[in-house]
Image (cartoon, rainbow, N blue to C red):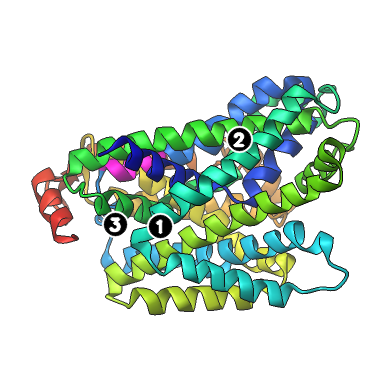
Amino acid sequence: MKTQDLLAIGLMTFALFLGAGNLIFPPSLGLDAGTSLFTAMSAFLVTAVGLPAFTIIVLGRISCTQYLTNALPKWLATTFWVLLFTAIGPAFGMPRAVTVAYEMGIKPFMTQDHLMVFSIIFSALTLLLAFKPGKLVDYIGKFMTPALILMLLALGLSAFISPLGVPGHPVGDYQHKAVTSGLIQGYMTMDAIAAVGFGWVIIQAIRAKGITEPKMISSVTFKVALIYAVLMGGCYIAMGYVGATASTIAEHGVNGSVILTRYVAGEFGPYGQYLLAAIIIMACLTTTVGLTNACAEYYKETFNASFGLTATCVVVLTGIIANFGLEQILKVSLPAILVLCPVAIALVLASFTASTVSVSAYTHTAVLFTAAVFGSVDAISILGKMPKELNDLFQHALPLYNAHASWLLPCLVILVLTSALGTSKLGGERIGRIDYRLKTQASNSLN
């Protein structure tokens, strides 16, 4: 693959992930971590960037995103994908992006509420850009992302060149648990689940450049993940430093959007809000375009549905749901996201293992249900709905419960046990390093 094409796909991948949430989380972390920023941010990057990058690499290693669920019963695999794309697409991820783009990019300049008008315009632009999947790398990777990076550079470099203050003392858990807090905050970005969805777009973009051999797809995907990790890591570090040096303009506990708004006003004056608005709107737009493309690609490949019709339905539904407001969107959809994220990561771990050593055909199913059960426990805890008696019990009985990752160790145990105890062919047998010859044939049949 040409270096230019590789860089374009890498830039596209970075832009797909870069939503408003990725800009809001780090300033809050930076403000609270203060002088412990280096420690907290290092831990944050492990889960916020490392998990999505690892997911992209694994998807490239198995050469087709759908192989992630090939070992599951068909009904279960279909249920997983439909729930995932519904959650990160029109039910939560996309309406949230539309609403945040309006709240931070447009509303500050308006005297009246025009969310409906904005959602129609934003949705139409999303559909226009997503309607030609073959041009996605050109639209996002070659044009929109470079412009977005330049604006982010202006915002980030200003914090290093002329900071508004100095890092203060760490507060809360960052005083004594900077590493743990950073890891948890990075995990809570939930970008790992987005990586599973974006895998369809990334691998399709690689195939569109004529790369169809599994080992080449794996190699290119690794490089793409590396480009994404460097860019996203740099963005997080810059935004974190913005927060760390904002102690003179923002008090602890405020939302990251407030920190950014006050920072750009203090650093750039009245024009700062325009810069922030442009960054937020463009970041949200690239995300909705990517999610629309991912949803439409899945339904096209799985159900032979029309790409255009599916994309239109996804965007229209997104526009409708966005008008219910961010609070209602979070209330209804967040529980599903919190359960699906550990399930997605668990399947990635199982697929990585299966691409390396032989595993039982039941491994993926067992890991999925284990992640769903313990992920539900974590979701109830995160939402603050866990009864006190059970909360006290789980704090002592479940490792990593306080880190919202009580699903991890049980899944690893199940992964090891089912791999060790499985018999030897599909249906009760062993799968794994799953027949690269068949994978090559399947890969070619998709083109």
Going from N to C along the chain, the mark reached first, 3 or 2, is 3
User: Which percent across, then down, holds residue 350?
Assistant: 32, 43
Q: Is residue 443 left or right of residue 55?
A: left
Q: Measuring 75% from the left and 23% from the top, which residue is drawn there? A: 161
Which quadrant: the N terminus? top left
Q: Is residue 47 visible?
A: no
Which quadrant: the C terminus? bottom left
Q: Are marks 3 and 2 in contact (CB under 8 Å)?
A: no
Q: Quadrant of residue 172?
A: top right
Marks 3 and 2, how far apart at CA = 30 Å
User: Which percent across, then down, holds residue 38?
Assistant: 67, 21
Residue 136: mark: 1
Q: Which residue is mark 2?
A: 235
Q: Which residue is mark 3?
A: 66
Note whether 204 is above or below 111 in the view shown: above
The crowd level at tag 1 (other Cα within 10 Å; few <14, some 14-19, many 20+) is many
State the extent of the magenta-drawn residues as a range: 54-61
Q: Measuring 58% from the left and 30% from the top, which residue is drawn there? A: 234
Q: Measuring 8% from the left and 46% from the top, which residue is drawn there? A: 437
User: Which percent across, then down, holds residue 286?
Assistant: 53, 56
Marks 1 and 2, how far apart at CA = 22 Å
